[in-house]
Amino acid sequence: MLQNPDRVEQFTEEIAEMRLPDAASSRDRTLLRVGVALMVVGAVVGIVAYFIGHGTTNPLQQRDAIVMAIIGLTLAVIGGALFVRYSMAQFLRFWMARLSWEQTSQTDRVVEAIRDRP
């Protein structure tokens, strides 16, 4: 797909005029990283709980390991939700700006075509 440099420059200027929040704002970026960290920590907690549960014959320690594994699973699910939410938000923010610009451009072309009619 060939791109006109003037069109790309115009798109960049119009995005700047819309004053959209930065796609990589510090809060969004931080929560995205927290989501990844929670997924990793949740997996580690689950693995540790597995070894604790299988390393003993004491039912009380095994139940503690089950609770620990559920906590790890919960952390991983929460981390996954944070990761998906903030990674999709970053993508959709750009997609919405691009869609808005393309619709405006298309409307301008239609208006010019109507004006040029004899």
Image (cartoon, helix red, strand yellow):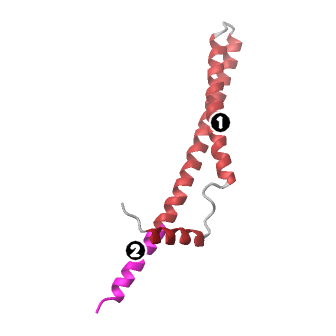
The residue closer to the viewer here, 71 or 16, is: 16
> Magenta stretch containing residue 101, yes or no?
yes
* Residue situated furthest bottom in the rendering: 118
Label 1: which residue?
38
Label 2: which residue?
106
Q: Secondary structure at mark 1?
A: helix
> Magenta stretch containing residue 44, yes or no?
no
Q: Which residue is at 36% across, 89% downward?
A: 115
Question: Where, by quadrant of the figure, is residue 66 drawn?
Answer: top right
From the viewer's perspective, is residue 71 above or below residue 81?
above
Q: Which residue is at 62% across, 38% downward?
A: 36
Say whether residue 65 is left or right of residue 115: right
* Residue situated furthest left in the rendering: 118
Kindly report the secondary structure that dominates the magenta region of the rendered protein. Answer: helix
- Asked if the residues shown at circle 1 and circle 2 are in contact, with their CB atoms under 8 angstroms apart, the answer is no
Read off the magenta span. Answer: 100-118
Q: Position of residue 6 (x, y in %)?
A: 46, 72
